[in-house]
Image (cartoon, rainbow, N blue to C red):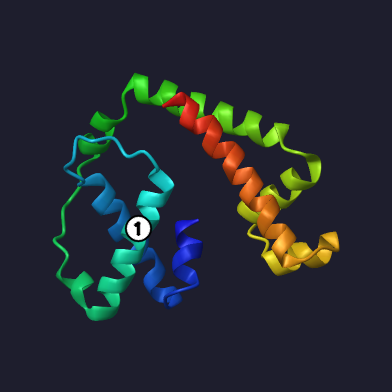
Amino acid sequence: MLRRYFLKRAHPSEVDDLVQIVMMRMHSRQSETPIENVGGYIFTVAANVLRESRSGAASRTIHVELEPADLIDTITPERLVMGRRDVDLIVEAIEQLPERTRRIFVSHRFEDRTYAALAREHGISVSAIEKHIAQALRALSQVLGRTR
């Protein structure tokens, strides 16, 4: 999703670098406060990175080398179990969506289908597609909100 966000807003040759900068900022985040809406936070960081890249500030970003041990230390058995649980809950929530909403959501999010293409395929308006996507996101947000 992050790559798709940047592809719509930046030159394709910059996308991987912009994604890398977002991931580095997420990794080097210093706050102990948990992030309540990770998706929203990531896209806020992405918007800031994009704005900075346009002003040239991204080139002044400090480069931090990651050692494999740095990554391994952050992957604890508890985090693995929590991540698997979240994935299971998300899959279950997607399966419980109304059939049409599920098909639209899966096509858009996992097959990169545009709203316009989905609207044509389903014989409905783009606005109706947006409502199906919003319904699916609300359901997923509720499921994830209950687990935190």
Task: Tell me where residue 69 appears, x and y as whole percent.
Answer: 21, 34
Q: Is residue 21 visible?
A: yes
Q: Amino acid at mark 1?
A: Thr
Please tell me which residue lies in front, 141 or 55: 141
Which residue carries the number 1 mark?
A: 44
The quarter of the rendered structure image containing the C terminus is top left
Task: Tell me where residue 125 appears, x and y as whole percent.
Answer: 77, 66
Q: Which residue is painted at 40% across and 43% down in the image? A: 37
Q: Which residue is painted at 65% across and 52% down in the image? A: 133
Residue 78 located left or right of residue 61: right
**Vertical arrangement, residue 19 with respect to residue 40, above or below:** below
Q: Quadrant of residue 33?
A: top left
Q: Secondary structure at mark 1?
A: helix
Q: Which residue is painted at 73% across and 43% down in the image? A: 102
Task: Tell me where residue 84 appears, x and y as whole percent.
Answer: 49, 26
**Vertical arrangement, residue 136 with respect to residue 88, above or below:** below
At label 1, counting other C-alpha atoms closer than 10 Å, the crowd grade (few under 14, some 14-19, many 20 or more) is few
Residue 40 located left or right of residue 121: left
Considering every residue shown, the one lying at the far right of the view is: 123
Q: Quadrant of residue 12?
A: bottom left
**Vertical arrangement, residue 75 with respect to residue 103, above or below:** above
Task: Tell me where residue 87 appears, x and y as whole percent.
Answer: 53, 31
Q: Which residue is painted at 61% across and 37% down in the image? A: 139
Q: Is residue 110 visible?
A: no
User: In the rendered picture of this protein, how many numbered marks are placed on residues?
Assistant: 1
